[in-house]
């Protein structure tokens, strides 16, 4: 079973930003895929279990961006 979570992330403006955010989120336990889209500020995360909000926030903040919340 896969759970899809769509996040709003502030500050992404290019492909490098997309890769940086994706790498940070992909490192979280249970994450199986990440697709970031800078123009929309959206990041789609597939995981085998629900994501922990604080872990997601920490990963996004650690990448240098701001988690706005779930969409």
Image (cartoon, grey):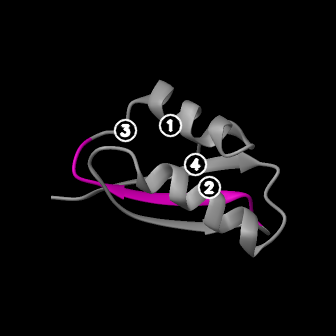
Q: Nearer the viewer, residue 6 or 24?
A: 24
Label 2 and label 4: CA atoms lie apart by: 11 Å
Mark 1 highlights which residue?
56
SS label for mark 1: helix
Comparing marks 3 and 2, which lies closer to the viewer? Answer: 2
Pointer 3 residue: 51
Nearest to the eye among marks 2 and 4: give it.
2
Tag 1 and tag 3, C-beta contact below 8 Å: yes
Q: Position of residue 27 (x, y in %)?
A: 41, 50
From the viewer's perspective, is 15 left or right of 53?
right
Mark 4, residue position: 7
Q: What span is colored magenta in the figure?
A: 40-49
Tags 4 and 1 touching, CB below 8 Å: yes
Disc count in the image?
A: 4
Q: Earlier in the sequence, mark 3 or mark 2?
A: 2
* Residue 48, magenta (yes or no): yes
Say what secondary structure mark 4 lies in. Answer: strand
Residue at image coords 84%, 64%? 13
Q: Earlier in the sequence, mark 1 or mark 3?
A: 3
Does 33 sit left or right of 17 as displayed? left
Query: Counting other residues with Cα less than 10 Å from the Cα at mark 1, is it few (<14), some (14-19), or many (20 or more)?
Result: some
Nearer the observer, 1 or 26: 26
Q: Earlier in the sequence, mark 4 or mark 1?
A: 4
Q: Quadrant of residue 2?
A: bottom left
Q: CA distance from mark 1 to mark 3?
A: 7 Å
The label shown at residue 42 is none
Q: Secondary structure at mark 3?
A: loop
As drawn, 26 above or below 37: above
Give the quadrant of residue 19: bottom right
Under tag 2, what secondary structure? helix
């Amino acid at each position: 079973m896969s759970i899809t979570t769509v996040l709003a992330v502030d500050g992404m403006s290019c492909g490098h930003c997309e890769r940086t955010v994706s790498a940070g989120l992909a490192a979280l336990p249970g994450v199986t895929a990440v697709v970031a889209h800078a123009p929309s500020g959206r990041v789609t995360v597939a995981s085998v279990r629900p994501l922990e909000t604080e872990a997601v926030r920490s990963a996004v903040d650690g990448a240098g961006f701001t988690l706005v919340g779930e969409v």
